[in-house]
Amino acid sequence: MSDFRTDLGKVRGIGAAKGGVHEFITHRVSAVVLAILLPFFVYGLMKALPGGYDGLLAWVGSPTGAFVLLAFLSAGIYHGRLGINEVISDYVQTTGIRSLSMILNALVSVSAWLIGVLAILKIWL
């Protein structure tokens, strides 16, 4: 009976992640970045694919192609990681399994990003 907070004050800060607004905004920003990069990525692939494997290597080896591919890879993996985290936080009930799943998701995402970036940089440089 000594709780004098309003209903809104009682609800604030309650939720699975306690940071839903930040995750919502970053998810939308990464989606917009992907939407902006997609035409450049598709155009580069369309120009490179008639040359076959050598044409693709030449496109990735160019500064423009490497930049577009690095940005698209980074935004795509980040966007996917945020989406999978949202699914995990919504549907996994057990706290321990939820935490383990989010850590595993982060590790897999960072590993995939590192492998992709190293591959692109190896071709480019």
Image (tube, rainbow, N blue to C red):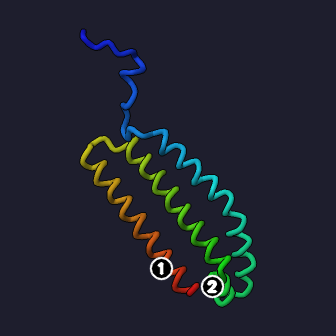
x 71%, y 81%: residue: 48
Quadrant where the N terminus sits is: top left
Quadrant where the C terminus sits is: bottom right
Apparent side of residue 80 relative to residue 72 in the rendered image (left or right) = left
Disc 2 crowd, CA 10 A, few/some/many (<14, 14-19, 20+): some
Name the spot of residue 63 as percent of width and height, x first. Answer: 65, 80
For badge 2, the amino acid type reads Gly
Apparent side of residue 19 relative to residue 120 in the rendered image (left or right) = left
Badge 2 marks a residue whose secondary structure is helix
Badge 1 marks a residue whose secondary structure is helix
Q: Earlier in the sequence, mark 2 or mark 1?
A: 2
Name the spot of residue 5 as percent of width and height, x first. Answer: 35, 16
Q: Is residue 45 above or below residue 54?
A: above
Q: Is residue 110 above or below residue 57?
A: above
Instruction: Kindly report the distance in space between the C-alpha atoms of the residues bearing marks 2 and 1.
Output: 13 Å
Q: Is residue 34 above or below residue 111?
A: above
Question: Dot 1 corresponds to which residue?
Answer: 118
Residue 61 badge: 2
x 32%, y 54%: residue: 101
For badge 1, the amino acid type reads Leu
Name the spot of residue 11 as percent of width and height, x first. Answer: 39, 24
Q: Is residue 9 above or below residue 94?
A: above
Residue 63 badge: none
